[in-house]
Amino acid sequence: MRPYLTDPAAIYAASFATVRREANLDRFPSDLTELVVRVIHACGMVEIADRIAFAPDAAASGMAALRAGAPVYADCEMVASGITRRLLPDAADIRCTLNDPRIPAMAAEQRTTRSAAAVDLWDTDGAVIAIGNAPTALFRLMERIDDGAPPPACILAFPVGFVGAAESKAELATTPRAPFVTLRGRRGGSAMASAAVNALGILAAGGEQ
């Protein structure tokens, strides 16, 4: 077997050095650069840097919200589980309403997905939103804002799949409802969404891990 790194600190340092060396990061503000680096690290694809759309104030708005104790809403348990609690300010709360007992009946009544129905239980006002699974959750979030729900501080939109993922993210990028970061196209996933939240937590704490 070929030699391989076993020192955790060396692996960590080499991984992030590779991302910074190989990814095209020039167009991002410094705070968003840190977020993009961590999203790339979570998926191993440096080429996604060219597909990321963003509002320039997204990271600053998300950091301010976390420092103020705003909640983080995740569209699925995998996103919520991937968020490292110790990286967030003490007052910040991670919430996922997908398994709320009311959701199956709400989804059936609305003739929609459980993920979309779960968004109706979110208090969006000034929150940080992390979507890493369901395009219908992102579509429903935008519908709610269009209908008058208070906008969140930051939308981290990484829904994945072949039906609705590219379309929902294109809608967000074309007509932003709040400061946002998203990955255009079909790619996405819970690991990316969680990594984006973790990056905001690290930045909000001044870069300490």
Image (cartoon, helix red, strand yellow):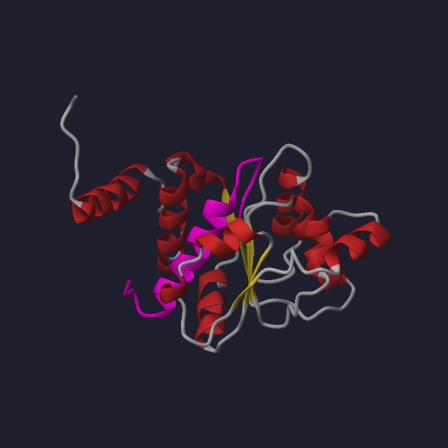
Residue 3 visible here: yes
User: Total of numbered circles in the picture?
Assistant: 0
Residue 194 x %, y %: 46, 53
Locate residue 118: give its quadrant. bottom right
- The one of 59 and 44 positioned closer to us in this rendering: 44
> Along the line of sight, which residue is nearer the eye, 168 or 55?
168
Question: Would you place residue 134 above or below residue 35 in this image?
Answer: above
Q: From the image, which quarter does the N terminus lie in?
A: top left
* Relative to 48, 159 lies left or right: right
Q: Which residue is at 48% across, 59% downward? A: 56
Quadrant of the rendered structure where residue 176 is? bottom right
Residue for point 37% across, 53% down: 33
Say which quadrant the C terminus sits in.
bottom left
Q: Which residues are magenta?
A: 182-209
The answer to whether residue 27 is seen in the rendering is no
For this orientation, the residue located farthest to the right is 109
Between 19 and 191, the one nearer to me in the picture = 191
Farthest residue in the front direction?
A: 101
* x and y percentages locating residue 52 in the rendered image: 49, 45
x, y (%) of residue 183?
A: 52, 44
Q: Nearer the viewer, residue 59 or 55?
A: 59
Tell me if 68 is positioned left or right of 75 in this view: left
Q: Is residue 116 left or right of residue 10?
A: right
Residue 166 falls inside the magenta stretch: no
As displayed, is residue 55 above or below residue 71?
above
Task: Check if residue 192 falls in the magenta segment.
Answer: yes
The residue lying furthest to the top in this view is 1
Expressed as whole percent of the image width and height from the top left, the position of residue 36 reads: 40, 49
Does 190 sit left or right of 41 as displayed? right
Q: Residue at x 60, y 67 (%)?
A: 152
Residue displayed at 55% across by 48% down: 132
In the image, residue 169 sits, relative to residue 64, either above or below, namely above
